[in-house]
Structures are given as C-alpha cells and as structure tokens.
Image (cartoon, rainbow, N blue to C red):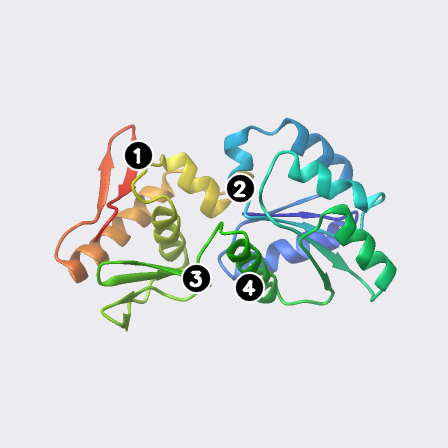
C-alpha cells in the first residue's frame, strides 16, 4: 500500500485512482489527518505501507523525520515545478527521492523498487526452485516461461515470497494487497484469490507450495 499526502483532495484521489488501475492499493491524506494517523497507527498497519508520497504540504520538510521515526518505507517528494533550492532542502530533510509532476504511477513504483533495492530491503526477483518471482510488476516465470496471473494473485504471491518461511495471516495479506482503509472489499476475498493461486501453482508444479493452517494463516515453503 502507498500513502499519498497532499493538501488537495483532487491530487490524492487522482493518484489513488491511477494506482488502483495498476492493482496497487493506496490511501490519501490531507496533512492534518496524516500527522494524527502516523503518530497513532498500529505497527502492524504501518508495516503494510510500501512508500509515502509527499505532495503539497505546509512545512513539508518536517514530514520525512515524522515518517522515518516510525517506518523504513521510502519517502518520495513530488514537486509541481522545478526548483533546485526546494529539492536540496527536501533531500536535506530526509526524503529518498524527489520527482516532478506529472509523473506516471509506474515510474513511481519503479523508483520505490529501486530505493528498496539500494537499501537491501528488496531484490529484483527471487528464485524458488524452478519458479522465479519478480517485484517490478512482471508475472512470475516457471522454467523460464511466463506464468500469467491476475494482478491480485500476483501481488499475493509476491507478498508470500517476501515472507517465505514465515506464517502470515489473512488480515496481513489483505492489508498489503488492498490497503488498510478499503472498506468496500471483504477480507474473505483473500481466501478466494489464494484458492485460485494455489490451484494454478499445483497444476504447474504438481503440488501445493502454500501451507495453510486454519486460524494461523499461510506460509510459502522456503524452497519450491
């Protein structure tokens, strides 16, 4: 999930819509709401945030420190116009990148991935036996051939791979894929997506690599 902070609702709503078209959950905040939220949100919910996008806010230089006190997720500032002094001030305040609008959401996602790789938070891909899972929007590959998956199933597989060897709950998967603010989707939809994903993996691999225990959640085997 990505969090967008901007004084203009039209900006937060616009980016949320574009991220949604890419299958990426997001939430928009006005500055006042965000300050209260980031100070009080539970650690588990905050862990679902992949990056913060900092738009037009008063005292913008104060936000990176506020965020980084509670999260390791990248902070990307978005400027409406080029300004060297403003850019330098933002980097000095602790942002991880500065971009100029308009910018396509795919470029933002690519920049988030690049920042995470530099920080050793995330790698380009992970090979588990004959299956290779990517983290840049590409479908996984099995024996070098593309295994086409719907966006939600692909995102769930990526989440399970990132947490391989650890058991994760349905709520954790839901928060990562749909975001913690999506009240229009029932949490049980995760079960449907995972069921379809498991059938496809079982058909391709000959067995089910996702271990599930009722009330405890799901775990992807460390090696496939």
**Residue 38 found in image quarter:** top right
Residue 17, percent across and down? 60, 57
Tell me if mark 3 has few (under 14), some (14-19) or many (20+) residues whose alpha carbon lies within 10 angstroms of its own: few
First of labels 4, 2 by sequence position: 4
Q: Nearer the viewer, mark 4 or mark 3?
A: 3
Local crowd at mark 2 within 10 Å, few (<14), some, or many (≥20)?
some
> Mark 2 and mark 1: span between their CA atoms?
21 Å
Residue 30 shows in this picture? no
Residue 217's label in the rendered image is 1
Query: Sequence-wise, which precedes: disc 2 or disc 1?
Result: 2
**Mark 4 neighbour class, 10 Å CA radius: few under 14, some 14 to 19, many 20 or more:** some
Q: Going 45% across and 63% down the picture, which residue do you hit?
A: 137
* Residue in view at x 38 percent, y 53 percent: 158
Chain-order first, disc 4 or disc 3: 4
Viewer-closest of 114 and 167? 114
**91 versus 174 height, above or below:** below
Q: CA distance from mark 2 to mark 3?
A: 28 Å
On screen, residue 80 versus residue 110, left or right, reads right
Question: Residue 8: where, in percent of width, then height?
Answer: 78, 50
Q: Look at discs 1 and 3 and give the one toward the viewer.
A: 3
The Cα–Cα distance between marks 4 and 2, rounded to whole angstroms, is: 24 Å
Q: Which mark is residue 172?
A: none
The tag earlier along the polypeptide, 4 or 1, is 4
**Residue 19's quadrant in the figure?**
bottom right
- Rounded to the nearest angstrom, the CA distance separating label 1 from label 3 is 26 Å
Give the residue number, with chain letter if any, for mark 3. 124
């Amino acid at each position: 999930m990505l969090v967008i902070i901007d004084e203009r609702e039209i900006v937060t709503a616009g980016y949320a819509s574009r991220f949604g078209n890419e299958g990426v959950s997001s939430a928009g905040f006005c500055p006042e709401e965000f300050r209260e939220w980031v100070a009080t949100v539970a650690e588990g919910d905050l862990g679902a945030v992949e990056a913060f996008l900092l738009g037009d806010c008063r005292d913008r230089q104060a936000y990176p420190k506020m965020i980084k006190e509670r999260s390791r997720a990248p902070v990307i500032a978005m400027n409406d116009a080029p300004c060297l002094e403003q850019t330098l001030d933002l980097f000095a305040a602790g942002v991880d990148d500065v971009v100029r609008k308009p910018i396509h959401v795919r470029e933002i996602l690519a920049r988030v991935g690049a920042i995470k790789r530099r920080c050793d938070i995330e790698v380009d891909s992970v090979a588990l036996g004959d299956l290779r899972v990517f983290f840049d929007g590409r479908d996984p590959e099995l024996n070098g051939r593309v295994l086409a998956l719907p966006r939600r199933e692909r995102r769930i597989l990526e989440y399970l791979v990132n947490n391989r060897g650890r058991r994760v709950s349905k709520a954790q998967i839901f928060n990562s894929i749909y975001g913690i603010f999506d009240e229009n989707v029932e949490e049980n939809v995760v079960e449907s997506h995972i069921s379809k994903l498991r059938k496809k993996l079982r058909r391709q691999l000959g067995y089910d690599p996702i271990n599930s225990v009722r009330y405890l959640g799901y775990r992807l085997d460390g090696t496939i």
